[in-house]
Image (cartoon, helix red, strand yellow):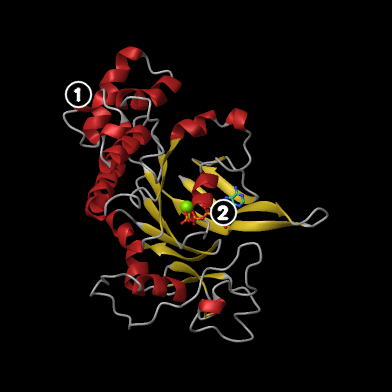
Amino acid sequence: MLEVTQLKTWFPVKKGFFGKTRYVKAVDDVSFTLSRREVLAVIGESGSGKTTLGRTVLRLIKPTGGRILFDKKDVTYMPESRLKWYRFATAMIFQDPFGSLNPYHTVQYILEEPLILRGVPPSERREKVVRALDDVRLTPPEDFLKKYPHMLSGGQRQRVGIARALITRPSLVVADEPVSMLDVSIRAEILSLMRSLQAKFDIAMVYITHDIATAKYLSDKILVMYAGKMVEYGTFRDVIREPLHPYTQALIEALPDPDPSNRFTKRKVPPGEPPSLINPPPGCRFHPRCPYAIRGKCDVEEPPLVEVKERKVACWLY
Ligand SMILES: Nc1ncnc2c1ncn2[C@@H]1O[C@H](COP(=O)(O)OP(=O)(O)OP(=O)(O)O)[C@@H](O)[C@H]1O
Ligand code: SF4
Ligand SMILES: [Mg+2]
């Protein structure tokens, strides 16, 4: 349903008055496919390009290169005037349940607004709103209709955010760190709710997170990003059981409560910070932090994405 090929989103930055334009290569050659009812987790540290990838896929940002096919239609460079159907077919769930809901609107209006935009007649709107609240388990729905966002807890607000995204029955949803600002105790509940609604409504979902531990609640596939590059891509089960890329291994090693079924031996998380995207390290972008870096190779040549054990990995070890 969604086919993303070698997607690039580069942001131009000017250096000095006569300076050459350089680019922040936030998304640099990312490819994946997603079918209806599938969830892809996009994992990576802060600044690795996850949000940019999600927003580009939804065409909220114009790509620099590559291709986005949605239901076989090429939306990569489709002008805004012809994108209305794509806007209607897609939705986004945001990180901040406080900032993403208009504080002056009631829950009822927040949920009705996308329906109004789509021309749903008033007679049908209330019923849809009530059903949407019921779907996200804000019950009884009548108790929530007249409430304002500040009267709700963080978890309840995010439920409203989810209801708003799904009320129009989109077929593709990007959820950008939807639980990272919520209390740890309710994260699993919200993620499980998203999983059940995603399956119920046949939604394809891109779940963006820096926390690989939360991905287990809803992911079928996983795409690991490092400094704008995809470094590993495969089914969630395979990648968690046996991560191949040293960076994926480090992310899994860093989990506070590692899955005891993991067979790999204990390794230390590599020290250091993710690199600058304006001037990334040559060769493999991970080489300054990689315990296995091969001198003269990893710091010179960029590893291609190769197929190993039914997944894709970009590392010279394979
Ligand atoms: N509009 C923009 N103009 C210039 N640079 C941008 C723009 N948006 C993002 N960037 C840069 O692109 C890089 C990737 O940012 P992005 O927000 O996609 O990362 P992220 O993985 O979502 O990070 P986080 O986990 O902190 O949300 C960063 O270096 C960021 O500063
Ligand atoms: S290509 Fe080299 S530096 Fe990069 S992850 Fe593989 S071993 Fe490490
Ligand atoms: Mg982000």
Q: Is residue 91 left or right of residue 131?
A: right
| Residue lying at 62% horizontally and 83% vertically, measured from the top left | 297
161 vs 118, nearest the viewer: 161
Crowding around mark 1 (Cα neighbors within 10 Å: few <14, some 14 to 19, many 20+) is some
Are the residues tagged 1 and 2 within 8 Å (C-beta)? no
318 vs 210, nearest the viewer: 210
| Residue type (three-letter) at the residue carrying disc 1 | Glu
**Label 2 residue SS:** strand
Which tag, 1 or 2, sits closer to the chain's start? 2
Q: Give x and y (percent) for residue 25.
A: 62, 58
Residue pointed to by mark 2 = 5
The mark total stands at 2
Q: Is residue 201 visible?
A: no
In the rendered image, the residue lying farthest to the right is 18
Q: Is residue 68 left or right of residue 185?
A: right
**Residue 26 occupies quadrant:** bottom right
